[in-house]
Image (cartoon, rainbow, N blue to C red):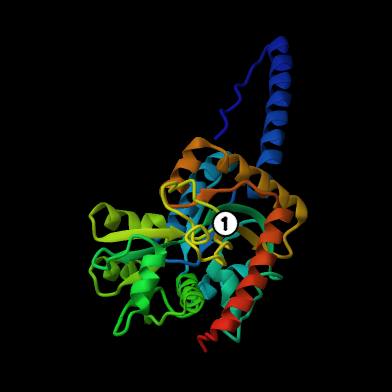
Amino acid sequence: MPTPLRTFFSCPAVYAAKLSLAAMLALLMASAAKAGPFQGGVVTIVVPNAAGSSFDNAARAVAEPLSRLWGVPVVVENKAGAATTIGSSLAARAPADGRTILLVTTPTIQAPYLYTKLSYNPVTSFAPVAQMFDGRLWLAIHTSVNSRTVRDFVVLARQAGSKFSYSSPGPGSTPHLNMVQLSRKANIELLHVPYKGVSPAVVDLAGGVVSATFASYSDLLPHVSSGKIRVLASTGAERSPISREIPSMKESGYPGFETIGFGGLVVPAATPKAIVDEIARDVNKVLATPEVKAKLIFLGFEPVISTPPQFAKVIKDQSEYWKKMMADANVKAD
């Protein structure tokens, strides 16, 4: 609340008070201009993933500093389910005033090729604001599997009587599609064991229930540290800055895994460009801070700064890539 203006009775004081009032009004107008459409309201970041997930924590990493920057509450609302389609559908129908922002990730882009009936299109129903991070995956095995490299793993999987299995967060998920691609490139057969979420998929790998999985580094790391899981390679064109000691899939002899996951913010498509640009500028300010960079890296993500057009290209390119991948894998949820 602004400090109440004092009442002065002398003429010089009244004049001074008028000047003070003018200065205060100018300050308030400048503040309102900075806060833009968010003045006096609440901004919601819809996360179509479960609370406590790495995507959820990434959204919370930017929500707090954005709240300080805008001077309004920025709340994270988890609307998980149906491969991100529940939360994404909700955000697509929200008023186009900049107050509802959606965290869009690779599963959001994959959804149209997994579900035949959606009330929104992840490319045309939203206006891209800013990419936040790249999110590659790491191929990991249980330490009972006698392999130190991807080639070692493939050799073992090709042996007669081999019964290797792999976990994933479900059919059509990026870990599932990556393993399908590896199986085809390496000419091996692996049993797919789908789970409801990343966490149980990784926990059962650590427990030796399955032999392998693709997952984020942050999900794997606790079990790597305990000696239950061994990481063999990462997706991406080159080694990840998060794990310089681990080769890429391409470096390991299996190209085709250069496209990696991503995360970023979008708003309903009809949101005015001025609002989109304002949000983008402030999101990038926040992403550039050491505090937020460190939080994203801790989660296994690689921070990215981008413009709305640059992020739009990422979404378009990813949509085309995963459309082909999912058609080749012949996966559908309905």
Residue at left offset 38%, top offset 54%: 218
Q: Is 92 on the left or on the right of 151, as rendered?
A: right
Q: Position of residue 280 (x, y in %)?
A: 66, 48
Is residue 96 visible in the rendered structure shown here? Answer: no
- Residue 115 occupies quadrant: bottom right
The amino acid marked with disc number 1 is Ala
Taking depth in this image into account, of 234 and 15 the one nearest to the observer is: 234
- Residue 179 occupies quadrant: bottom left
Name the residue beneath numbered marker 1. Answer: 237
Q: Position of residue 228 (x, y in %)?
A: 24, 60
Q: From the viewer's perspective, is residue 133 above or below residue 46?
A: above
Quadrant occupied by the N terminus:
top right
Q: Is 226 on the left or on the right of 81, as rendered?
A: left
Residue at left offset 63%, top offset 77%: 323
- SS for dot 1: loop
Taking depth in this image into account, of 206 and 211 the one nearest to the observer is: 211
